[in-house]
Image: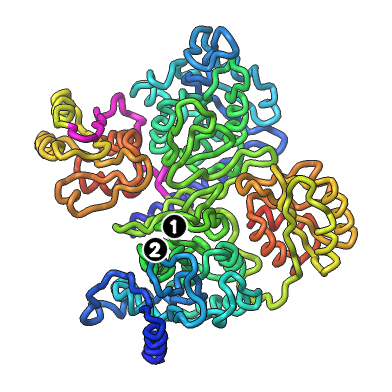
Amino acid sequence: MRAARWIGAALLAFAAGVAVAQEIPRSVPPEAAPTGAAKLPHVVLMSMGGTIASRATDRLNITNYGGPGVPRVDPQDWIHDLPELAYIARVTTEDFRAPPGRAAGSEIYDDLVVVARRLNELAREPDVDGIVVTHGTNIMAEVAFYMNLVVKTHKPIVFVGSQRPWTGLSGDGPLNLYNAVRVAASKDAWNKGVLHCMNQNINAARDVMKTSAYRMQTFKGVDVGPLGFADPDRVVFYREPLRRHTFNSEFAGRAYPQVPDVEVAYGYQEAPGYLIDAMVAHGAQGVVIDGIGAGSATASQTEAIKRAQAKGVVVVMTTRTRSGRVQMTPRRAESHIVAGDNLQPEKARLLLQLALTKTHDIKEVQRIFDEY
Amino acid sequence: MKIRFAVCMALLLQGLAFAGERAWAADALPKVRLFTTGGTIQSRASNRDKLMEYNDGPRVTPSELIADLPELAAVADVSYTEISNVGSGNIDTDKLLALARSVNAWLAQPDAAGAVVTHGTATLEETAYFLNLVIRSAKPVVVVGAMHPFSAISRDGPMNLYNSVRVAASREAAGQGVMVLLNDEIDAARDVTKNNTYRVDTFVSRDLGPIGFADSDRIVFYRRSLKRHTSASEFDVGNLKALPKVDIVYGYQEADRAAIDALIAAGARGIVLDDGATAFRDAVRDGQAKGAVFVQSDRKGSGRVLLSQAAAARGVVTADNLNAQKSRVLLRLALTKTSDPKEIQRMFNEY
């Protein structure tokens, strides 16, 4: 099956006069399974695709990779390219990629439901010690945060991706994947919620954010930093997150096939309220205002917020500054707006969607935003 | 593994102990004591636009600090103990030991809620980490300073002090170890460092970031440190009158061995190498022959010195991501217990 695909790709590449790029340094595969391999932790490597699962025909192509005719990286290809994994874990693979042709970053909510259901199943399997999920980097932080809320587990779930395709010159994918498996296989990674590991940093799903379009150090915790590091000598943790997650999440352990529609309205000079009206007219039950500064709406937005609230819509305020908390103030409390703490609006949106499956009570939604 | 379990149990027990200790009634304010050592937060200049060389006015006394903040009366029942009133360059071992003993005695009182230590910012991180290793309580200890003197326009000291008392009085801060608070950010003593000579946002934890914030609506924590500290620490300075001499040698192009040799000759029992140099290698071996312990730190200020078999074979302890001045603090305390590099490496891995 895989061979056939490769031959197809090679023929296609040959016809085009180019070869699929090969950039990963050659490695001598282990001659036999390492001693004690059966006792190694079992890590499930789940592919949701992403740049880390993409190839190009030219190793300098790090912006316009993939596309029709260029074979993607199948989960088994990672195992083949990284024989070193056999020394740190028993890795099995699962393929949850979106169908070819759907652009990365355009995952639909149904995909999250399917993956969340599978992650909950895997978490319950006694033979599974940890899970790695690959994902495109554009929205992986919010997907990881969603799983952080809905998967009931003490085991490590590590999200990983890459900024350069698998074929890119000095690609970051192989080391990121290798390190993600190390973290998922680590006992120290238990009980810390869904993790994110790229560029050797281990971050908490709640706090990590993509901060640069192309740099490899793109993922950062803007307000609070990493929990630990995947360093060459060892995987090491310095911190644990204090917000509720996974085993301690009231949303965890069940599926949410449908969640209420929640949209995000950005704040800027003269931002109009009619965008909020349109969201509500379109059926939104919640609106996240990504407000200016400490979390403010324009006069026009404020009027629209009142109209929305009159229809039962729950409004959460975040800040476009991307750092710092939207605080609860007496004036905010009077206006019945939920303070979004320091969540990015895309994460506030997912939390509000889940919260609205339980309650439309502002105080209860505020409690949820204070605790998660 | 066994040790980690013991640490977890100790942390758990200290948390439980603290929950049982909270003695103040709902209508009584938590008792917070201010331990003052001096620093810019207690400096007064002749003019309010003096932001450097500002020590030409009388020092600010602890009672002035408190009188300056009547708002504290709504937060805590604040008392004070004056340890010293000096810049942080003049904090020495005697003062550190006196400070640790005073804070420990205060926190041992059942009705004490927490402690705040004022300190000059230049070596604040060292004192904070020292306390993090020797305070025998899970109650909050906050070390605070200021970048602008008491007398300056837009002085940062009062808000820093106000927030420090709030944190020291807060239940959420228990078990977090010793904290440093300036500029609304709560940092872990182990990880924080002074990062800028004059800006108010000088204190940062370069590798790990803050653990929480003192915001107007509430004190909020997002992280808990996994390293051993305070009541889970094995170090005790209760009966010590001195600490082993440990110094720091900086590494740079063509650094020679003279500094190491001189420190060994002067009686150093430990030396922290802040980065390496080829010429250090022989000096380290000779120093070790005289019983000195060497710790390898790194001048870059971020990232870990990895555990390496090569370093272990040379008997050199690697500092993890402790900077040189913090490595010195830990090595001094480690040397009160052992001079076995393997055992000291364990301590550097755990604290």
Q: Would residue A363 be seen by someone viewing this image from the given angle? A: yes
Q: Which residue is mark 1?
A: A216
Which residue appears at 14% of the width and 27% of the height? B258
Identify the image quadrant of residue A14.
bottom left
Identify the image quadrant of residue B220.
top right
Mark 2, chain letter?
A
- Residue B233 image position (x, y, % from top left): 38, 43
Above or below: residue A233 compared with residue B311: below
Q: Secondary structure at mark 2?
A: loop
Give the position of the N terminus of chain B as an image quadrant.
Answer: bottom left
Q: Secondary structure at mark 1?
A: loop
Q: Which residues are magenta?
A: B227-255
Q: Are marks 1 and 2 in contact (CB under 8 Å)?
A: yes
Which residue appears at 50% of the width and 40% of the height? B187
Q: CA distance from mark 1 to mark 2?
A: 7 Å
What secondary structure predominates along the stretch shown in magenta?
Answer: loop
Three-letter residue code for mark 2: Asp
Pick the front one: A221 or A170 = A170
Q: Which residue is mark 2?
A: A172
Which residue appears at 42% of the width and 33% of the height? B131
